[in-house]
Amino acid sequence: MDLCIIIEVTLPAVHVSSCGRNLVAMLASSKVVMWYDFERVLRGEVKMRDIALTFQLGSPRSSSKYLAFDDRRIAVATVSALL
């Protein structure tokens, strides 16, 4: 029997690079996740969790407010800092 678990996640912001290969998401819990060349997931070559770079920015209880991504840099504003 296959078991499917659905997890609800609040994503205040998601950006795709101008080349369309990289994806950055900001979770409400002040976590930022980046997937380099995420099309590999769509082609079935890798699993999403295997190529994710995850950064926890401060307490998971504090919320993130803003995400910017310009293909080379990621900027995040949380309730306590601008990173």
Image: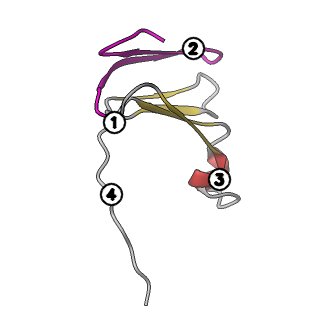
Crowding near the residue tagged with mark 1, few <14, some 14–19, many ≥20 C-alpha atoms within 10 Å: some
For marks 1 and 2, give the CA distance: 19 Å
Task: Of the two numbered discs 4 and 3 on the same chain, state the one appearing first in sequence.
Answer: 4
State the quadrant of the N terminus. Answer: bottom left
Q: Residues within 10 Å of mark 2 (few under 14, many from 20)?
A: few
Query: Residue 69 at x, y = what percent?
Result: 52, 17
Q: Which amino acid lies under the numbered mark 1 shown in the image of this protein?
A: Leu
Please tell me whether residue 65 is drawn above or below residue 5 in the rendered image. Answer: above
Q: Which residues are magenta?
A: 61-83
Please report contact status of discs 4 and 2: CB closer than 8 Å, yes or no: no
Q: Secondary structure at mark 2?
A: loop
Task: State which mark lies toward you, 4 or 2.
Answer: 4
Q: Earlier in the sequence, mark 4 or mark 2?
A: 4
Q: Secondary structure at mark 3?
A: helix
Residue 7, labelled with which disc? 4
Can residue 77 be found in the magenta stretch?
yes
What number is the disc on residue 70?
2
- Secondary element under disc 1, as helix, strand or loop, is loop
Which residue is at 55% across, 34% downward? 23
Foreground disc of the pair 1, 2: 1
Disc 1 designates what residue?
Answer: 11
Q: Quadrant of residue 26?
A: top left
Q: CA distance from mark 3 to mark 2?
A: 23 Å
Q: Which tag, 3 or 2, sits closer to the chain's start?
A: 3
Left or right of residue 34, residue 8 in this image: left
Element assignment for label 4: loop
Question: Disc 1 versus disc 3: distance between alpha carbons?
Answer: 20 Å
Q: Which residue is mark 3?
A: 50
